[in-house]
Image (cartoon, rainbow, N blue to C red):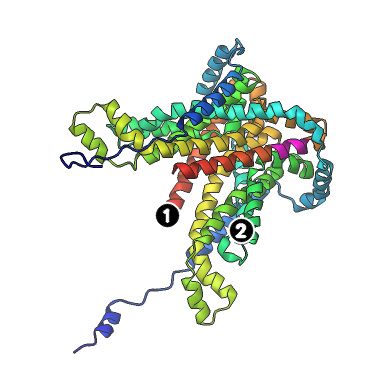
């Protein structure tokens, strides 16, 4: 009788170690990319080392922060939060029909959801600050262009996350409702909404966190909020005031992140 | 609950007693938020400007794509790309020690990993635009400041994701190697690294996608990339040029997302 083990080893040859050429080529490609990028952006460590004391000077001028400036920026901070809240809400409301249009399992044909997804991807390519700069050009200075920019940005993010969740819902309830003669609206209200409302709320909160951070810098392009004060204080080289703005923003952002994370944990 | 004839009734889920207070609080917050937004007082010219922007976007200034003497669209986009590549690589390298510092299973005492986590979330909440302003003070305006800002800011997110990955590794292979007499370095190289590498690369590519978007706006404050000519075109109201720059950004980001998405799918 033949040894089964022996015949086994004869049939399956020992696996060859993976070749190194691919790794070497990948590494070379990455190094080439890095070198090209360094040339393009004029990286110079000499400049960094020479400029480093300047940065330390700047940090030194920031401390101690001038706390009395705090009273001037509370209104700006409230406006920032307001912008984030209104922008996120408008975005979330618009995102609902958009997400439904993009969901492959709810729309009848790919001629509906492929173009919808394509448009959504296009919207998502533009960063919020860039949108704000555009809207400032159209509507003039103030919080309204900032709100619109945040709303557009929120639609992109919330609709994408929501439609991906929509595609994973359980089809059972929908089929049961079709069987008892429900129409499309009834199917969505009683079959789809209960399955995704918690996830949707969680995405809205997550987007709100991102929008608070974004709203804090939109003022740099004139779109309202606390960002306006960066321009003012940096322009007059009052770095101790800038430090107050930075610290205040950090505190608010950390607090909102914390509250929102706790809420999201409760939701899911 | 059972009725007289023995049918089982499903109890309705009890309603949250805090429902009304929460709804009222939310309503108050929204009234505060919306009442503070000056929705009136748009520029009367908004409609007109919108029309000319649309006209500009649909008849882009193709001549700007390539200018022999420089400062054109292609060079701006290349600059943006180079900034994001370098920024991502710098942060991917720098965040590794932070990730091991804040991974819970790598240190015996909780305060050590806890302090690492706080450090990372501090870096994360510090907006990259503000970092770029600081670096401009150090190395002067230009792409290099943008590279440094992105490199430092991305540590926050990458470090957190890497740390989460490290916390999820399986210690079996490590112990097996230790039992057969491997050194600490060999354990890291042959047992830990193979487990975390695909995740690391995946997150790095994901962060790269985000960084390309960020790099397009760094130019707003003079940190290099396509943002500078965009802001210039917006302020001089040359809409066809705004159109071609927006088109260039959308195309570049879409292509990068496609490539990066393909590579990430192959990795996981």
- Front residue of this view, candidates B132 and A229: A229
Specify the subunit that label 2 lies on: B
Question: Which mark lies nearer to you, 1 or 2?
Answer: 2
Q: Position of residue A226 (x, y in %)?
A: 69, 30
Write down the quadrant of residue B107 in the picture: bottom right
What's the magenta region? A242-248
Please state if A39 lies on the left or on the right of A158 as rendered: right
Query: Does the image show residue B18?
Result: yes
Q: Identify which residue is drawn at 67% across, 22% down.
A: B235
Quickly name the residue at label 1: B266
Label 2: state its secondary structure.
helix
Crowding at mark 1 (Cα within 10 Å: few <14, some 14-19, many 20+): few
Left or right position of A109 against A152: left
Mark 2 surroundings: few (<14), some (14-19) or many (≥20) residues within 10 A: many
Instruction: Give the alpha-carbon distance from disc 1 to disc 2, as whole Å.
Output: 29 Å
What residue is pinned by disc 2?
A: B102
Q: B196 or A210: which is nearer to us? A: A210
Indicate the position of residue B191 as horizontal and vertical percent values: 50, 70
Q: Is residue B133 above or below residue A28?
A: above
């Amino acid at each position: 009788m033949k040894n089964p083990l022996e015949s086994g080893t004869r049939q399956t040859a020992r696996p060859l170690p993976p070749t190194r050429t691919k790794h070497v080529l990948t590494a070379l490609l990455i190094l080439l990319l890095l070198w090209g990028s360094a040339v393009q952006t004029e990286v110079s460590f000499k400049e960094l080392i020479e400029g480093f004391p300047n940065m330390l000077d700047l940090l030194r001028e920031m401390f101690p922060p001038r706390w009395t400036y705090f009273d001037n920026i509370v209104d700006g901070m409230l406006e920032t939060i307001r912008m984030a809240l209104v922008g996120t809400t408008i975005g979330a409301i618009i995102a609902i029909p958009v997400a439904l249009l993009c969901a492959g399992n709810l729309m009848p044909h790919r001629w509906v959801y492929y173009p919808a997804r394509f448009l959504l991807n296009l919207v998502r390519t533009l960063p919020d600050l860039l949108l704000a700069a555009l809207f400032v050009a159209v509507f003039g200075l103030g919080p309204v262009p900032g709100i619109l920019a945040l709303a557009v940005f929120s639609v992109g993010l919330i609709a994408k996350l929501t439609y991906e969740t929509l595609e994973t819902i359980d089809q059972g309830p929908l089929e049961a409702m079709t069987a008892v003669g429900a129409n499309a609206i009834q199917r969505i209200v009683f079959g789809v909404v209960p399955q995704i409302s918690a996830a949707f709320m969680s995405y809205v909160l997550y987007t709100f966190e991102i929008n608070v951070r974004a709203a804090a810098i939109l003022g740099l392009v004139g779109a309202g909020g606390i960002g306006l004060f960066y321009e003012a204080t940096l322009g007059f080289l009052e770095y101790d005031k800038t430090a107050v703005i930075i610290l205040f923003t950090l505190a608010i952002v950390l607090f909102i992140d914390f509250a929102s994370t706790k809420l999201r944990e409760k939701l899911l | 609950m059972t009725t007289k004839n023995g049918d089982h009734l499903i109890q309705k889920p009890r309603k949250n007693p805090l429902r009304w207070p929460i709804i009222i609080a939310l309503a108050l917050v929204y009234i505060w938020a919306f009442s503070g937004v000056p929705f009136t007082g748009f520029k009367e010219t908004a409609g007109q400007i919108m029309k000319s922007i649309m006209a500009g976007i649909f008849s882009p200034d193709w001549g700007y794509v390539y200018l022999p003497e420089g400062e054109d669209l292609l060079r701006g986009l290349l600059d943006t790309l180079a900034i994001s590549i370098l920024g991502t690589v710098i942060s991917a390298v720098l965040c590794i020690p932070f990730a091991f510092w804040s991974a819970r299973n790598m240190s015996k005492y909780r305060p050590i990993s806890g302090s690492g986590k706080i450090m990372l979330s501090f870096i994360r909440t510090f907006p990259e635009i503000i970092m770029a302003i600081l670096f401009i003070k150090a190395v002067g305006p230009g792409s290099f400041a943008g590279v440094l800002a992105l490199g430092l800011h991305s540590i926050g997110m990458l470090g957190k994701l890497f740390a989460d990955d490290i916390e999820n590794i399986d210690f079996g292979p490590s112990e097996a190697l230790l039992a057969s007499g491997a050194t600490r370095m060999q354990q890291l190289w042959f047992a830990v690294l193979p487990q975390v590498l695909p995740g690391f690369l995946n997150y790095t590519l994901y962060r790269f996608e985000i960084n390309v978007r960020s790099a397009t706006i760094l130019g707003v404050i003079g940190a290099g990339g396509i943002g500078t000519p965009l802001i210039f075109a917006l302020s001089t109201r040359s809409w066809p040029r705004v159109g071609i720059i927006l088109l260039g950004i959308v195309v570049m980001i879409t292509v990068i997302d496609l490539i990066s998405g393909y590579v990430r799918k192959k990795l996981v």
